[in-house]
Structure formats: C-alpha cells, structure tokens
Amino acid sequence: MSYRRQLKVPAQSFFLFGPRGTGKSTWMKSDFRPDLAIDLLRSRTFLELSADPSLLRMQVEAMPKGSRILIDEIQKIPELLDEVHAMIFDFGEAYQFALTGSSARKLKKSHANLLAGRAIQRRMAPLTSVEMAGDFNLDSILKFGALPRVLGLQSDADRVDYLSSYVETYLKEEIQQEAAVRSLPSYHRFLKHAAAMNGFVVNLNNLSREAAVARSTLDGYFSILEDTLLGSFVEPIHLKAKVKEVATPKFYFFDCGVTRALRNDLREPLGSEKGYQLETFILNEIRAYSNYTQAGWEFYYWGTPSGNEVDFIIVDGRKKTGLEVKSAKTWKKEFGNGLRTLFEEKKIQRAMAVYTGDRRLKDGTIEVFPVAEFCRHLFAGKI
C-alpha cells in the first residue's frame, strides 16, 4: 500500500531524521529517487565503509555531476559525515546528498560533523490524516497508530504482532547493540511506565518509585527517548495570567500504537487512556504540519495547580493559539474554561478545540471542530 507523503524534496543536501518505520526509505525511493543509494544496514556495506570511509568519495566521484546520493542510517558511521562535508565543500552543488537517520544519539555522542549548516534538516512523521485520505479511521489510529506498515496490515492480530516486534527491535538494535544503557531490564521497565504516563505531567519521583529506577538515571533515559526520536517533551508556557501556573513538562510519544505496544496493552480495548491517545495524535498532526511546511511553530501547554488547563499552545511568531482536545462526543461548556481564561486575558489570539463529535460548533469565542474536520483545516493552512 502506497501513500503520497506531504514532505517535499529540498533543493539542497539534507538530513532526514525520523523513527524507524515512518517511511523514510520508501519516500527516498519514490520522491528523492537517488542515483546512488548506500544502505548502512547492509552488513557488507557497513563493514567496507567502516574500515575505509574514503571509499564513499570514490563511489560518489564515479557518478556524473548532478547525481543524487542517498546514505541510509548515517548514524551507523558518523565518520562519513566528514567525507560528505568535504565533497560539498569541494564540489558545491554538483551532487545532492540525502542522509537519513533514526537516531541522533550516536551523532551527538561522537560530536559528529553535522555539515556546518551545509545540509538542512527535515523530519519524517508517521502518516498524517491527509496522507491516509480514505484509509483514515480514528479508532484504529488511537489503538494501533499511524506507521505505514500498520495501515497496510489486514487484521488487528497482525498489527499487534508488528508493533510488538517493533518494540523488541528497538530494544535490541537501538539500545542493546549500541550499549545505550547499562541495564536493559531497567530501561525496559522505564519504557513501560513512561508510556503509561504518556501525556501526563512528568513526576520523576513517582516514576522512579514505580519503575524501580534511580531518580538520577531518569534524565538520561528520557534523553535516549528523545535522541532515538520516540518522543519529546511539551514544556509549560508562562503567560503571566492572573493565576499561579505549572512549571513541569509533559512527555508524548511519537505514535499512538507504539505507545500502547510499550505498555503491552495492544490487545485491550481503549479505556481511560483514550483522551491522552487523542492528544498524542493531534500533537503529532500539528508537529508534522509544522515540519513539512517549515512553519516553525513551537508547542507548549498551559496549566494551573488547581487543574485549569489548555492542552496545547501553538506559538507562531507573536501569535498564540490555544487548542483543547477532548475525546468526548458531546462538547460541554466547561471543557473550554482554560481557553476562555486565556482569551479573555488576551494571552492567546485564537481559541480552538477538537472533540470526537460530528458537528462543528461555536462556543462563544471558541471554535470547536470534529477531529477529521480539524485535520483538514490544519493541512489547508487555516490554523
């Protein structure tokens, strides 16, 4: 099954980062169309270039000017970046390089040469609603996520098998083989409990106790999650409203299905976590739109100790949009209390909400959208 992706091929050399399984290699073949493709997951290729990185230059120079060069999983041999940098310096735009990676950890650890701005960066996300088109099914996405392979499978049992294998592969190849942690069982416990906290305010003391992981270790574990692109923090925003504001971030994983696989509850029906899964999906939609269009949005949340909260604050330059996400099929006025507080105090310029009902509504100053309509609105550039 093939999906047309929203990401456009840049005009210059670029990095393409994204978690495993998001479709980087497929997009490279269909859209970038390399004249020379070097896959560092292939043992022979990896061993040859590890032993002698200069072989890369020999291969590239054998190609005609104007060729497109793909190096897949560049983090496997960070030293190749020096060769790429030298060729861009020597040959200018004679060749276009595309460098993919599913982890920034090894690049950071080795202080790898990121080409000093000579190559721009792009991010690949799971499939978005607009890319799925007629295959978009919200309940299925909240249960099993939006990785391309998942949508191509015919049964829930196959989806469970694939996502369970995805987590196992991540632990073996990204963590164990790279010796990212001292104790794999400890990190595995952390993953399960971190996934159970997806979308919650991060309480490191509680997480340390529940996962039986030292408090001092947790910062490093979260850094690994960020570096391997499995998730990211959403920081609280301080708008100086007339109330005390929270100061602790939330953490969201990059895909609903992977989150449930990490919790080992793929075979269970969606329960109380449905709201957080919907938040995860909406956050990943707006992140993908911002990345693919180079909008440069920043994402925060706002909250008070008393529980008044707005799920996301989208910052676009000086403009701030508040976005509340509810899994309810019926919109209730109290859902918009946080949005009204910020709008009335002129801390946000627009108040929006998403719910699982089927009618678009207007609740005073709050624009309320069904999920699918919000996503269409988003990718039409109307947010």
Image: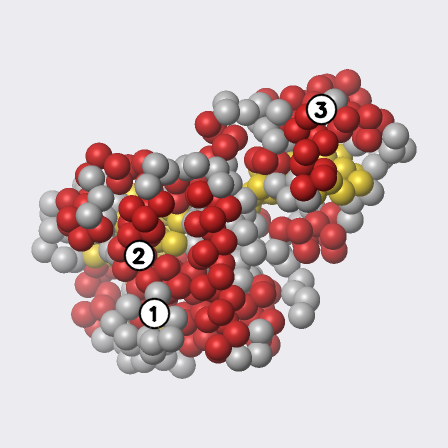
Mark 2 vs 1: CB contact within 8 A: no
Q: Which residue is mark 2?
A: 192
Mark 2, residues whose alpha carbon is within 10 Å: few (<14), some, or many (≥20)?
A: some
Q: Which residue is mark 1?
A: 265
Q: Give the side of residue 102 with respect to residue 187, left or right.
A: right
Q: Quadrant of residue 355?
A: bottom left
Q: Give the side of residue 252 with respect to residue 84, left or right.
A: left
User: What is the CA distance from the residue labelled 1 to the residue labelled 3?
Assistant: 45 Å
**Residue 98: x %, y % from top left:** 69, 39
Of residues 334 and 104, the one nearer the viewer is: 104
Q: Nearer the viewer, mark 2 or mark 3?
A: 3
> If the image is split into quadrants, where does the N terminus sit?
bottom right
Q: Sequence order check: which comes first, mark 2 or mark 1?
A: 2
Residue at the spot x=74%, y=22% of the render?
54
Q: Sequence order check: which comes first, mark 1 or mark 3?
A: 3
Up the image or down, 184 lies above or below 180; here it is below
Q: Sequence order check: which comes first, mark 2 or mark 3?
A: 3
Tag count in the figure?
Answer: 3
Residue at the spot x=40%, y=63% of the render?
261
Mark 3, residues whose alpha carbon is within 10 Å: few (<14), some, or many (≥20)?
A: few
Q: Amino acid at mark 2?
A: Lys
Q: Quadrant of residue 263?
A: bottom left
Of residues 110 and 120, the one nearer the viewer is: 110
Up the image or down, 182 lies above or below 268; here it is above
Q: Which residue is mark 3?
A: 52
Of residues 167 and 304, the one nearer the viewer is: 167
Q: Give the side of residue 98 with respect to residue 256, left or right.
A: right
**Residue 50: x %, y % from top left:** 66, 29
Up the image or down, 22 lies above or below 273; here it is above
